């Protein structure tokens, strides 16, 4: 049954998610309108013929005359006209809500401030190695709705807090909250509101997996729901810092030296992924075999090589301060670190970052919209106009054994298309040296 017949549907946001929504409704022969505040000509060219659109501003008349609004995650639900529509009783949903109403197969839903992309990829790889057909997407890679056009046995979705705001039909077979740090301060009135949005992922889930080290991630207890936890020196799935090994219920199953993926934050990610795999019946030996093969993940504490005697690390995915803190803490070395920071800040935690920087031998190189704010964290910081200028500053001063860490702690949209584009530019600059 087509539940969208006779609906007056407006899609707000014409990025990847918005376009996936257009294609979904067109396949169901449902007419929609789409709008975006951007005037980008490239976006206009992606709109299929016959679809009514408006760019450059929101069309308030279309919004208030609709009875179903599909909101892209990049559009704040707090936008005044969206709030006005809510008050009028107009239904507002997102792509994940549509997806959940369409699929019958199990869904693994993963969220958290940091690490969710990595865990989604690790879980996806483990499931592939078990010979199941898995659809991977959501907030990364393919939009969820684009997964509907192939047959899969199971889905693994990375879901953002913004997507969870407009989702009520998610009944995850396994739901995971990896961590919760102050983030998206431009979209939420408080950290409590942000956490509440993230924890919605546990609603109606059969199995809830959480971080034992972070009480904020703990779900409420419900009947007929199973719970698993992971952590550092804590939890059912744990990394033991003394023995440098991975344990499940006290029994060792993996040694640190077996892994190619480095960084304490990645050890936590691996634990979460294996907890998920166990939850859906994949034997631990299959998970172990898969995890051992995983090398660097692009833009995520990625060792890109050595040049001028220094180690270069691309951590462009660090779009908030807590992620950058994890990256710095994962460097077990007394060598000098050239830390490249900057972009558009969307998180708090400057004092915590300052403490960590002061404890290590760090030279700050800052750029972007909020580069000046970060440059004030330490004396003798270097403030640049661009990433290229940062690299030129560093290359003139590098010595053997030093480390260049590109972990911006900010969103990329001031100078780049996204974090991946930013990471690619860093890689090109590295190769040009």
Image (tube, rainbow, N blue to C red):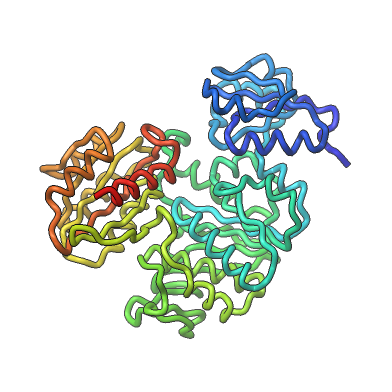
Q: Looking at the image, can residue 205 be seen?
A: no
Side (left or right) of 196 relative to 330: right
**Where on the picture, by quarter, is residue 19?**
top right
Which residue in the rendered view is the most extreme toward the top?
61
Image height of 318 relative to 176, above or below: above
Task: Say which of 41 and 86 sits in front.
Answer: 41
Image height of 15 relative to 181, above or below: above
Side (left or right) of 183 relative to 111: left
Image height of 72 relative to 240, above or below: above
Position of residue 255 measured from the top left corner of the image (x, y, whole percent): 41, 81
Residue at left 36%, top 33%?
415
Residue at left 17%, top 43%?
393
Quadrant, the N terminus? top right
Residue at left 56%, top 59%?
176
Q: How many marks?
A: 0
Image height of 158 relative to 255, above or below: above
Position of residue 173 measured from the top left corner of the image (x, y, whole percent): 68, 61
Task: Say which of 172 and 311 sits in front.
Answer: 311
**Where on the picture, by quarter, is residue 276?**
bottom right
Position of residue 318 measured from the top left corner of the image (x, y, whole percent): 38, 49
């Amino acid at each position: 049954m087509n539940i969208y017949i006779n609906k007056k549907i407006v899609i707000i946001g014409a990025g990847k998610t918005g376009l996936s929504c257009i294609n979904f409704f067109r396949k169901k022969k449902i007419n929609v309108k789409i709008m975006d505040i951007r005037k980008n000509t490239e976006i206009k060219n992606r709109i299929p013929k016959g679809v009514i659109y408006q760019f450059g501003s929101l069309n308030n008349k279309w919004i208030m005359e609709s009875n179903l609004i599909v909101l892209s995650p990049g559009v704040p639900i707090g936008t005044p006209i969206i709030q006005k529509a809510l008050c009028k009783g107009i239904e507002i949903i997102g792509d994940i809500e549509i997806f959940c109403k369409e699929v019958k197969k199990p869904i693994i839903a993963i969220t958290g401030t940091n690490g969710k992309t990595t865990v989604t990829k690790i879980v996806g790889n483990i499931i592939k190695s078990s010979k199941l057909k898995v659809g991977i997407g959501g907030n990364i890679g393919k939009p969820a709705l684009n997964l509907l056009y192939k047959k899969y046995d199971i889905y693994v979705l990375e879901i953002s807090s913004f997507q969870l705001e407009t989702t009520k039909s998610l009944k995850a077979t396994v739901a995971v909250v990896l961590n919760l740090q102050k983030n998206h301060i431009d979209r939420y009135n408080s950290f409590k509101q942000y956490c509440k949005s993230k924890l919605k992922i546990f609603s109606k889930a059969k199995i809830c997996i959480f971080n034992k080290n972070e009480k904020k991630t703990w779900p409420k207890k419900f009947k007929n729901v199973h719970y698993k936890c992971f952590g550092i020196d804590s939890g059912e799935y744990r990394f033991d810092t003394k023995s440098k090994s991975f344990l499940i219920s006290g029994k060792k199953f993996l040694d640190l030296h077996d892994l190619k993926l480095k960084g304490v934050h990645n050890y936590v990610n691996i634990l979460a992924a294996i907890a998920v795999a166990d939850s859906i019946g994949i034997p631990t030996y299959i998970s172990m075999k898969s995890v051992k093969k995983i090398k660097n993940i692009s833009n995520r504490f990625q060792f890109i090589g050595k040049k001028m005697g220094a180690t270069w690390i691309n951590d462009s995915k660090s779009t908030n301060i807590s992620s950058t803190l994890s990256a710095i803490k994962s460097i077990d070395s007394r060598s000098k670190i050239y830390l490249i920071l900057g972009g558009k800040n969307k998180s708090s935690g400057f004092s915590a970052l300052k403490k960590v920087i002061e404890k290590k031998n760090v030279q700050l190189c800052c750029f972007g919209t909020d580069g000046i704010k970060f440059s004030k964290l330490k004396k003798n910081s270097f403030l640049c106009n661009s990433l290229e200028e940062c690299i030129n500053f560093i290359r003139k001063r590098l010595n053997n054994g030093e480390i260049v860490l590109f972990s911006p702690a900010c969103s990329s949209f001031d100078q780049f298309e996204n974090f991946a584009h930013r990471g690619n530019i860093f890689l090109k600059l590295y190769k040009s040296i």
